[in-house]
Image (cartoon, rainbow, N blue to C red):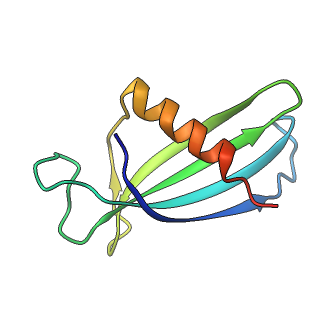
Amino acid sequence: MLTIKEYTAEFVKDPFGILPGKRYEFVLDLDVPEEDELFRESGVYLRVIYLVGEDQSRIVKYDFYERTTDLYLDFDMEPEEEEQLTAFCRENLPE
């Protein structure tokens, strides 16, 4: 499971209107256990694009990064982690 230490969320303008709805960008600072392969000494954060549409809300994209270097980390989430993240984004949308 994901352990979120802190986060920011903001509305992102979509000048092209490719996806109908409102987009939000979440940046989540994660607490990753040392035994996890995702662990990095400098920390890890997750950047998420979350779409709120008329009939559905969903994660469009997510990426893991190393905190100090902003190095992209090629990892996928487990289905239950994605469900947890979707619920988190839905419950923490900015006003």
Residue 65: x and y in percent read 37, 58
| Residue at the (85%, 24%) spot, across then down | 55
Work out whether 82 lies above or below 72.
Answer: above
Residue 46: x and y in percent read 45, 54
Quadrant in which the C terminus is drawn: bottom right
Residue 30: x and y in percent read 37, 59
Horizontally, residue 39 falls left or right of residue 23, namely left
Image quadrant of residue 79?
top left
Quadrant in which the N terminus is drawn: top left
Work out whether 95 lies above or below 38.
Answer: below
Which residue lies most toward the front here? 91
Image quadrant of residue 60?
top right
Work out whether 77 lies above or below 65.
Answer: above
| Residue at the (51%, 30%) spot, across then down | 83
| Residue at the (31%, 59%) spot, across then down | 31
Number of marks present in the image shown: 0
Work out whether 42 lies above or below 92.
Answer: below
Image quadrant of residue 70?
bottom left
Horizontally, residue 15 falls left or right of residue 52, namely right
Between 17 and 29, the residue placed more toward the observer is 29
Which residue lies most toward the bottom here? 68
Horizontally, residue 50 falls left or right of residue 32, namely right
Horizontally, residue 39 falls left or right of residue 26, namely left
Residue 61: x and y in percent read 57, 40
